[in-house]
Amino acid sequence: MLKNKYLVVIPGIVLAFVLYTLSQGFNNIIGIELLGYEKSPISTAMIAILIGIFFGNIFQVREMTGIGLDFTQKYILKLGIICLGIQLKPFEFLEFGKIAIPLIIICIISVLVVVKLLIKKLKIPRHMAYLISIGSTVCGTTAIMATAPVIKAKKNEISYAIANITVFGILSMLIYPYFANYYFESNPLQIGLFLGTSIHETSQVAAAGLIYDQQFNSPETLNIATVTKLIRNTFLVIMIPLFAYLYNRGEAKEKNYSIIKIFPYFVLGFVGMIIFRNIGDHLFLDTTSSQNWSQTVDIIKSSSKVFLTMAMAAIGLSTNLRGLKTMGYKPFVVGFIAMTTVGLVSLITINIAYLIF
């Protein structure tokens, strides 16, 4: 029984890997064979998610395959993010963190204030507004699913909020890497901070960073965006109790959330990989084992991009565009304004920080 439980995820994982391979093949044909570049200037991750959306909305994803695709989105994605930690050099995590935290706090407060005002103007359900706002400010679908039971949201409200985050997250994921490169004039720190604070999902930030890296050859931007987003994810530990208080204010209700359950533990894996890299550099660089250590680092780096691209393909396959037709426009207005607000606040704050410092 336990064996079958694990085997059932294999078809979806294999499908995601096939789409990754297909995307890499398309990328090589277009970028190298047709355009004549030595290295394709097109992002494999972007091709993977677009192919996934295309096939996912033409063909119906079977239940058995869907289980594996969910597994890929949740766990292989996290494995890819953990492996990204191997790219960070000593003290980079702390260096990015002290810059990112004030930026994240300002973005969260701004979106919460704007959404609070929109509830009154557009008269959308309070539950849905809470879900959209926490999804936009913290970590997308994960934040929505963690908050829903706390505020007793209905299933259709959860579905609306997730669809909202998915649509605007994918749009920003595909557009922001190119916009940020133009706006910030190829500055990796500013671009990484912007991508990490303005895009909703962890997977979408990882994809945007990967697209930027593959398009403009900037691993540093991918690192900064990932670190910023992981720090942002830990704010879930603060936001869930806050939303529970706001929702239950004035009513005697018991706490129905667990800090242990909502904490994003893969962040610890990411930090662990940074420590692993730093210890390895200290022990093996400038020794006879230097070449073996460098090869190990390169394998983990390459694996992280494969895992992340597989997750992008799985997300594309699971994105149902037909379901959006049945939804009202008001929640999407709120989602669009939330996305725009966090993007503008991020841009303004980064510019002010650079003028001051």
Image (cartoon, helix red, strand yellow):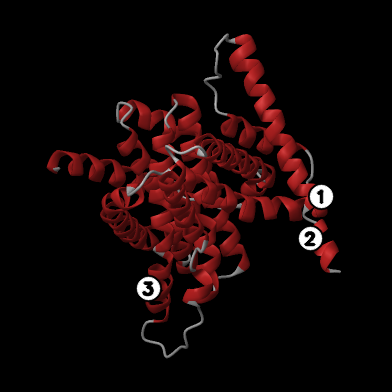
- Residue 286: name its quadrant: top left
Of labels 2 and 1, earlier in sequence is 2
Residue holding disc 1? 62
Give the amino acid at mark 2: Tyr
Q: Secondary structure at mark 3?
A: helix
Give the amino acid at mark 3: Leu
In this rendering, the answer to whether 280 lies above or below 251 is above
Q: Foreground mark, 2 or 1? A: 2
In the shown orientation, is residue 25 left or right of residue 208? Answer: right
Query: In this rendering, does residue 257 appear at all?
Result: yes
The structure residue drawn at horizontal position 54% and vertical position 36%, both measured from the top left corner, is 298
In the shown orientation, is residue 118 left or right of residue 30? Answer: left
For the residue carrying disc 1, how many other residues have a C-alpha within 10 Å: few (<14), some (14-19), or many (20+)? few
Q: How far across and down, in percent of the image, does residue 204 sit?
A: 51, 44
Farthest bottom residue in view: 252
- Quadrant containing the C terminus in the rendered view: top left
Q: Foreground mark, 3 or 2? A: 2
Distance Cα–Cα, label 2 vs label 1: 17 Å
Residue holding disc 2? 6
Residue holding disc 3? 242
Q: How far across and down, in percent of the image, does residue 202 sit?
A: 50, 50
Give the amino acid at mark 1: Arg
Q: How far across and down, in percent of the image, does residue 205 sit?
A: 47, 44
Query: In this rendering, does residue 168 appear at all?
Result: no
Q: How far across and down, in percent of the image, does residue 321 sit?
A: 65, 43
In this rendering, the answer to whether 49 lies above or below 258 is above
In this rendering, the answer to whether 76 lies above or below 177 is below
